[in-house]
Amino acid sequence: MTHPLIAEALDGPIASLIDGEMVAGGGAAITLIDPATEQTLGAYPDAGAALADAAHRAAERGGAAWRAMTPTARGATLARAATLIERDAERIAAVESLTAGKPIRDARAETARVAEMFRYYAGWADKIEGRVIPVASGHLNVVTPEPLGTIVQITPWNAPVFTAGWQLAPALAAGNAAILKPSEWTPVTSIMLGRLLIGAGAPKGAVSVIAGFGHTVGAALVADRRCGKAVFVGSVAAGRKVAALAAGAGRPALLELGGKSANVVFADADLEAAATAALGAIFGAAGQSCTAGSRLLVERPVYDAMLEKVARGAEALRVGPPSDPDTQMGPVHSARQRDAILAMIAQAQADGARLVAGGGALERPGCFVAPTVFADVTPEMRIAQEEVFGPVLAVMPFDGEAEAVAIANGSAFDLAGAVWTRDGAKGLRVARALRAGSVWVNGYRTISAQSPFGGMRGSGYGRSSGAEVLAEYTQAKSLWLDAGAAAPAFGYGAPGR
């Protein structure tokens, strides 16, 4: 039986949203588990390849209708969607908290941010402009940004509604249709968001949300030549598979992958502020965030003092049920995730890292891991190199700027980082030296739809927000209008190709 909150939110059982209708799949059963209790929330059948085809067919029809609307009308639709999200925010947040195990106060904040995303990109819809090039031939050469067509977007379980909004809003603003494939473990709030978009006036089929496994329906969606671009948010291993499938179909991909972000604290920093931010950076979302500050690099003169602050802060965190407004950290998402985190903790101890806080599962029902802090971590340790995706902090000492930058840049991931210092010049100097897509100075994990976000190297490629993302979702078309110039006798015009 489906949990009453989910059944009420969807007006029935979990299914895929295709062409404006809820359509049940025909594949293997997928069971949703409450991370806080490990009780069943409901089950639904995998969408499968047949519904992938149906979604692409619907996107071709709905996408054509969406592109036929004026950019101003598309923007107005996205603005109405933002208003509907705000109207239903409490229900969306409650479902997000239940299915993702996210503290309710975090779920409320993230739902509010989704409304902001749609309002921001609503303003961009009629401002995606072309240009005129004064070509030597005398033609009127007009370059127009054209939608790519149907964007297939695959999003993870750690922040379902946030990542759904982060992907859908700019893709739609640029005039594309979108097929969203959320994690099979957390599809509900994404389906709710898709229904609100249709309620706001998006044509049926312009937005589909497919509930199912990545290796079945996700792979079928990406490998289809009707896919204009594939977007993936998640693990490095899965992202590489998605990119390979897209390449096989001759299509581009945008990848937002993992991180092992370095939070660098110099001796002249405000240690109280840095420690408070460090706790939020790693224990927010139970460490299940691509930008989690999982490596805390501390200059040696203040290493012991900083370690004491974060260790005691970790022990004082309020860990509890996601529905409690006072909960600061909830469960990790699943028993499988919990066990993987505990294995990493055991490996860190075997490698010689010193455990100073936490270190195990909590003795209560649900998938809870204690906020964990390791000291004296060295750069070659596995805990310093691999993404744990859980509430585990590795604290590492350094001597001077050069060593701090070398350690920070010594990871295979290049998504985010931070620098703490009262010296403005040093803060800027080190921030620019860090190899990461986002770097904060005297702060951590502030992101906005208005600013570009994405990784480098092992953390992916492309930018999924800001004005920059509009280039990800459009392609330039060059239009040549004869303005009275003499036509070439044969071949290409000169000069040319």
Image (cartoon, rainbow, N blue to C red):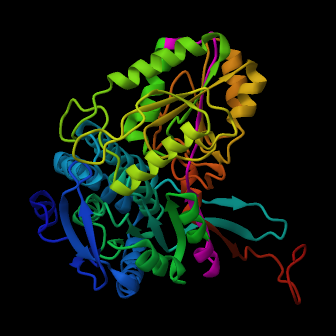
Above or below residue 24? Residue 194 is: above
Q: Quadrant of residue 287?
A: top left
Residue at the (9%, 60%) spot, across then down: 4
User: Where does residue 90 sit, x and y in percent of width and height?
Assistant: 17, 45
Q: Nearer the viewer, residue 69 or 277?
A: 277
Residue at the (24%, 32%) spot, across then down: 327
Residue at the (45%, 52%) spot, across then down: 340
User: Where does residue 438 sit, x and y in percent of width and height?
Assistant: 59, 38
Does residue 270 show up magenta in the picture?
A: yes
Q: Nearer the viewer, residue 491 or 284?
A: 284
Res 218 seen here: yes
Asked if residue 93 lies left or right of residue 263, the reply is left
Above or below residue 70? Residue 296 is: above
Q: Quadrant of residue 313?
A: top left
Above or below residue 469? Residue 435 is: above
Asked if residue 376 lies left or right of residue 465, the reply is right
Asked if residue 340 lies left or right of residue 331, the reply is right
The residues colored magenta run: 244-271
Does residue 110 show up magenta in the picture?
A: no
Residue at the (18%, 57%) spot, across then down: 39
Tell which residue pokes out farthest to the front in this image: 350
Q: Quadrant of the C terminus?
A: bottom right
